[in-house]
């Protein structure tokens, strides 16, 4: 049965290859035993796969075939694991998982714990790349249990570090910190500098949402460990994470300096992903501090790189921030254009949300057009009023020149003034009508966006009420306050307005200060009493 399993494995996994191995490899195998040949081919495949996928696959297939023919099941499991690594490196995940599954079956049947540990780690890496972090953690734990039994401290550090990174992606930061600290303690004891640096960067990422001081401590330690002149990719990642930490502490000068260093490193190393990350973060921070035009320069520079990378989730994130920037600069046409682009990229889960946003933008655009029309009419009315005033003065002067007909002129003038008052009254009535139309339009917008009945128009707006504060709330703070009043959590608010949770907390602390309250409940009560928020 096992022989049949091996033959089926080779037929499904190793069939259809035709690459020719170099003559030097063929010559080297002439004097080797089957065991040595299987080992040699596995090692050669592992060494060459970065440079030539086809030859690596041919070598691994030959090695697996030799192992199967001679009943070398441990070498066959090891060869299947190597073949899975090759497929995984080229993101052929179905083939990679198939190799790992066959290797794991052999390991379970014969108790090849050492190979099972490697297969578990590699399977976890595949799941990590696919975003299935639960499965990744499960496979990493399989490897970790074997490594703990064997008291392999370095292997335990690698597995713990991978588990910690997976928990970061799951946003389970306390567990991530626990495993990363376990890995770091081993790397410190072994003085493994590169591994220490990667783990310190992971700890900095985990603490970014938990404790900024700890985040900065670990990232600064990592940067010092690498040295000032280091220009590696991991140094660039540390600079980005550290820049985010300082931006959350409102030290924007230091944050931008770190993002610039990260961008320079990514250019020197040809790391396109690093360039994208640095540019997006520079734009994000400019958005957060209200420099929306400057933010757009970074976003527009990042956009072609993101498109070329094919990473749709980053493109969606970037376009979302661009929509916000264009909205804040009142370029609603561009905002609509990029919102449509975001909808084209987004899946069906987010389509409804995007449609509602488009309706909001269209309503704002129509409202802006209406306001411009009213402003134009008011300007024309003011010009007409000024001309009428000049005419009145001219009539008064003329009445002094014609004393003999003063009574007649007086009567004419009085009649004229009465007509003017009627016109002014009519004009005021028209202005009140325009104001009523604006209020109805606002009510209509609220009805579309909030799916509630329009509020009864009042004579004083939220903006007027806000002006009574010593330090009025900004538009962004009003937006955050409205969403909190709607029962949204900090995380939900952050997702809806495309900022981090820390930025939402920053806005809330400003709101408490301006309203002279101490917490969210007091803020909502006072804002409701002042009619700054709608029910």
Image (cartoon, rainbow, N blue to C red):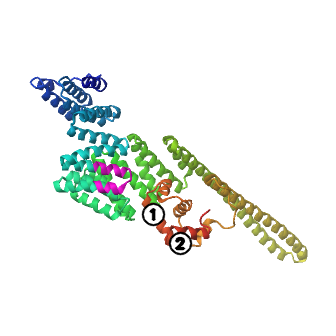
Picture residue at 29% right of the left edge, 45% below the top: 140
Towards the viewer: 225 or 390: 225
- Considering every residue shown, the one lying at the far left of the view is 31
Residue 522, picture quadrant: bottom right
Whether residue 259 can be seen here = no
* Label 1: element kind: helix
Picture residue at 19% right of the left edge, 53% below the top: 193
Query: How far, Cα to Cα, is label 2 from label 1?
Result: 15 Å
Which tag, 2 or 1, sits closer to the chain's start? 1
**Is residue 53 shown above or below 202?**
above
Q: Can you say which quadrant of the picture contains the C terminus?
A: bottom right
**Is residue 343 shown above or below 286?**
above
Q: Main secondary structure of the magenta part?
A: helix
- Taking the image as shown, residue 511 lies to the left or right of residue 72, namely right
**Is residue 406 shown above or below 322?**
below
Question: Which range is magenta?
Answer: 161-179
**Is residue 274 shown above or below 469?**
above
Q: Can you say which quadrant of the picture contains the N terminus?
A: top left
Towards the viewer: 483 or 97: 97
- Taking the image as shown, residue 30 lies to the left or right of residue 268, namely left
Q: Which residue is mark 1?
A: 505
Picture residue at 58% right of the left edge, 49% below the top: 356
Q: Position of residue 506 (x, y in %)?
A: 45, 64
Q: Which residue is mark 2?
A: 515
Picture residue at 26% right of the left edge, 38% below the top: 119
Q: Position of residue 171 (x, y in %)?
A: 39, 53
Q: Position of residue 168 (x, y in %)?
A: 35, 52
Residue 494 falls within the magenta-colored stretch:
no
Residue 394, picture quadrant: bottom right
Mark 2 crowd level (few <14, some 14–19, many ≥20, 10 Å Cα): some
Towards the viewer: 116 or 300: 116
């Amino acid at each position: 049965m096992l022989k049949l399993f091996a033959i089926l494995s080779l037929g499904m996994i190793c069939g259809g290859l035709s690459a020719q191995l170099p003559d030097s490899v063929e010559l080297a195998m002439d004097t080797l035993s089957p065991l040595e040949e299987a080992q040699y081919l596995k090692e050669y495949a592992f060494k060459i796969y970065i440079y030539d996928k086809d030859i690596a696959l041919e070598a691994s297939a030959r090695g697996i075939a030799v192992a199967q023919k001679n009943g070398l099941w441990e070498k066959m499991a090891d060869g299947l694991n190597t073949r899975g690594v090759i497929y995984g490196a080229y993101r052929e995940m179905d083939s990679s998982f198939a190799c790992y599954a066959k290797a794991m079956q052999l390991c379970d049947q014969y108790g090849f714990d050492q190979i099972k540990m490697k297969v578990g780690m590699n399977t976890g890496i595949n799941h990590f790349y696919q975003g299935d972090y639960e499965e990744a953690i499960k496979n990493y734990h399989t490897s970790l249990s074997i490594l703990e039994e064997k008291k392999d401290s370095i292997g335990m550090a690698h597995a713990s570090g991978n588990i910690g990174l997976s928990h970061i992606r799951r946003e389970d930061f306390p567990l991530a910190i626990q495993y990363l600290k376990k890995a770091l303690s081993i790397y410190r004891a072994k003085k493994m500098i590169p591994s220490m640096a990667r783990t310190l960067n992971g700890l900095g990422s985990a603490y970014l949402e938990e404790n900024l001081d700890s985040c900065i401590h670990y990232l600064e330690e990592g940067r010092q460990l690498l040295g000032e002149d280091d220009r590696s990719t991991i140094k660039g990642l540390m600079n980005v994470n550290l820049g985010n930490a300082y931006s959350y502490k409102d030290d924007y000068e230091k944050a931008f300096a770190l993002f610039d260093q990260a961008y320079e490193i990514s250019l020197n190393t040809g790391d396109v992903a690093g360039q994208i990350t640095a540019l997006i973060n520079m734009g994000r921070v400019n958005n957060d501090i209200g420099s929306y035009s400057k933010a757009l320069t970074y976003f527009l520079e990042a956009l072609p790189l993101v498109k070329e990378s094919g990473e749709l989730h980053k493109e969606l994130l970037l376009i979302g921030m661009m929509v916000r920037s264009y909205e804040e600069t009142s370029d609603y046409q561009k905002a609509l254009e990029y919102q449509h682009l975001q909808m084209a990229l987004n899946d069906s889960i987010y389509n409804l949300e995007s449609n509602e946003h488009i309706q909001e933008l269209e309503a704002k655009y129509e409202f802006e057009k209406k306001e411009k029309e009213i402003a134009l009419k008011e300007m024309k009315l003011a010009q007409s009023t000024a001309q009428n005033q000049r005419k009145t003065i001219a009539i008064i002067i003329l009445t002094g020149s014609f004393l003999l007909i003063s009574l007649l002129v007086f009567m004419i003038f009085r009649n004229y003034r009465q007509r003017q008052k009627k016109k002014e009254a009519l004009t005021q009535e028209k202005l009140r009508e325009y104001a009523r139309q604006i209020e109805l339009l606002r009510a209509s917008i609220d009805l579309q966006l909030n799916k509630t009945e329009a509020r009864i128009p009042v004579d004083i707006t939220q903006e007027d009420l806000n002006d009574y504060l010593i330090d009025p709330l900004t538009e962004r703070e009003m937006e955050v306050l409205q969403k909190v009043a709607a029962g949204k959590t900090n995380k939900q608010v952050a997702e809806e307005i495309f900022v981090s949770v820390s930025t939402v907390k920053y806005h809330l602390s400003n709101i408490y200060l301006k309203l002279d309250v101490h917490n969210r409940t007091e803020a909502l009560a006072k804002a409701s009493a002042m009619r700054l928020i709608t029910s």
